[in-house]
Image (cartoon, rainbow, N blue to C red):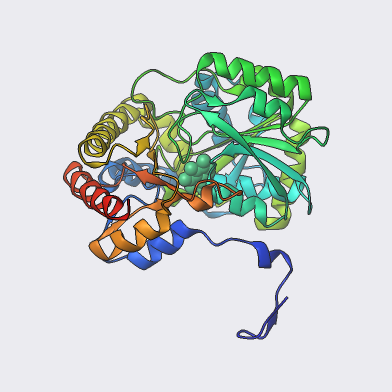
Amino acid sequence: MTNHDCQLTLARRMGTLPSSCVRELMRATGGRDVISFAGGLPRPDLLPLDAVRAATDRVLTREGGEALQYSSTEGEPALRSLIAERLLAPRGLRVAPEQVLVTTGSQQGLNLLGKVLLEPGARVALENPSYLAAIQAFSLYEPDYLPVAMDDDGVLPDALEQCGGTRAPNFFYAIPDFQNPTGRVYSRRRREAVVEVLARRRLPLVEDAPYSHLAYGEEPGPMLASAYPERSFVMGTVSKILAPGFRIGWVAGPARWIEQLVRAKQATDLCTGAFAQRIVAELLRELDLPAHLARLRAAYRQQCDAMLAALAAHLPGEATWTRPTGGMFVWLTLPRHLDAREVLNRTLPRGVAFAPGESFSPDGSSRHALRLNFTNATAADIERGIAILAEEVKRLL
Ligand SMILES: Cc1ncc(COP(=O)(O)O)c(C=O)c1O
């Protein structure tokens, strides 16, 4: 493929790589006074600034120049242990520290999985809709997608059983805890049913779990991988519970699978920044994590309630939406003949942004839906923004 503007011959894979509509929106609206429901950002005043300052100081005093050296590709041993102990074990997954690979954000985990597991024409089964940046990350490796239908209890086991027919997918990518973009959580019974299908088909699972610790009511059931550890990768991140600026995530899985990702990571970035890893380890050790999470949950629960109340007050009867009990997103479905991009074209000049649904479904089936983030806007802005969104939806009906 030749791009005459920049006189570069681009790799074929760039031709089909979608760009992130959310990143573009963030760029377009950055600095402007916009009520943004588009990203998945934590609320800035909930970032643990004082704890980070103190942790940084302690790390530099105690560890000196060592803290500023390269790390091993696998990651800092202390951090790998803390992730296993403090973040995975409470979700039902018992792994040894050696089974945890620290990554540069969990987005890098998605990229490494694509590198190691996908070649052109490989098949990825995923929930419909699914996380747009996972679709973007996998798309670099030119797979075909098999979107699997969901209901409010999670992915449909029958649809998963049949997906791909005799040509089974290379893996199933799932976000069972407060999914991005729908906010749905798999019920306990559905978790069991899905694991049964995976085991019967011997399908590898990639379980992405950035929102597991952000439950606003009942805790989600144990991770799918806890009942299927021999064929599961689990991904996580501190982006939603500490701060995205650290760019610290992880992939855990069977040791021989993790070794393959380590080789790919060596070739990708040598290692994740040691300084950020050591500060995050110190935070996981010293911060009162349960109290910090309780603060996040209380604040986000109120914002979620504000969004659900605003939707009920303003949206017309033809629209439906999910009612999340955790995470960061509500998924709003409009009548089929509406295109959420057209709605966005009308709300943006009025200062309201959101993520149109199209990019969350590789088969284009979510054009009439949209994702609303509620964690990075005040209750007053949520009310004002949803009122504007509803006005524009009604004009298009
Ligand atoms: C489902 C899912 N996976 C991965 C990520 C990437 O997170 P990170 O900041 O760790 O790269 C996100 C971020 O929004 C997400 O929602």
User: How far across and down, in percent of the image, does residue 169 sit?
Assistant: 75, 37
Considering depth in this image, is 202 or 252 the residue closer to the camera?
A: 202
Establish if 389 lies above or below 311: below
Judge left or right: residue 375 versus residue 155: left
User: How far across and down, in percent of the image, does residue 237 sit?
Assistant: 50, 40
Residue 350 makes an appearance in the image:
yes
- Quarter that holds the N terminus: bottom right
Q: Residue at x 27, y 34 (%)?
A: 308
| Residue 289 sits in quarter | top left
Tally of numbered tags: 0
Considering depth in this image, is 353 or 327 the residue closer to the camera?
A: 353
Q: Residue at x 57, y 29 (%)?
A: 81
Residue 71 makes an appearance in the image:
no
| Residue 98 sits in quarter | top right
Q: Residue at x 39, y 60 (%)?
A: 342
Query: Outermost residue, left direction?
Result: 380
